[in-house]
Image: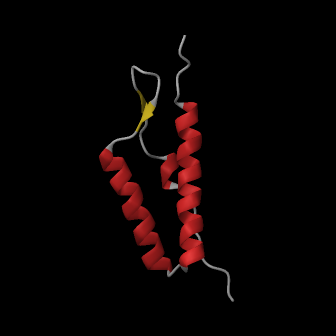
Amino acid sequence: MPEQPTPARNLATWLPLVTGSDGQPYISCTSVAALLEYCAATVRITGLDGEAAAQLLDSEGAALSVRAIAHTAARP
């Protein structure tokens, strides 16, 4: 089976995150919608199969998790 194409970068690394007054990172609903639309479009355009599409979602989720950890403020 030929190797599936993959996106060149994670969109999640470009989405705006803010740190709330509770020290937790937050992302807007608009940004979440853009991320989901990007994943759906990537799957459609590249013709990714089920496992490759799952890997795309895993990759975006991991990128967003790393950024969320970096934006979490320490609480006294």
Task: Give the residue drawn at x 50%, y 78%.
Answer: 46
Q: Quadrant of the N terminus?
A: bottom right
Residue 30: % across, % down: 30, 49
The colour scheme used to paint the residues is: secondary structure
Q: Splitting the image into 4 quarters, where does residue 15 fall?
A: top left
Q: Is residue 9 among the parts visible in the rendering? A: no
Q: Splitting the image into 4 quarters, where does residue 16 fall?
A: top left
Q: Is residue 39 among the parts visible in the rendering? A: yes
Task: Give the residue drawn at x 55%, y 80%.
Answer: 49
Task: Give the residue drawn at x 37%, y 51%.
Answer: 32
Residue 5: % across, % down: 60, 76
Residue 41: % across, % down: 40, 71
For residue 10, above or below residue 73 = below
Residue 57: % across, % down: 53, 62
Q: How many marks?
A: 0
For residue 27, above or below residue 45 = above
Q: Splitting the image into 4 quarters, where does residue 44 fall?
A: bottom left
Which of the two residues, 10 or 55, is positioned nearer the viewer here? Answer: 55
Q: Quadrant of the C terminus?
A: top right
Which of the two residues, 5 or 24, is positioned nearer the viewer here? Answer: 24
Q: In the displayed image of the protein, which residue is found farthest to the bottom?
A: 1
Q: In the displayed image of the protein, which residue is found farthest to the left?
A: 30
For residue 75, above or below residue 34 = above
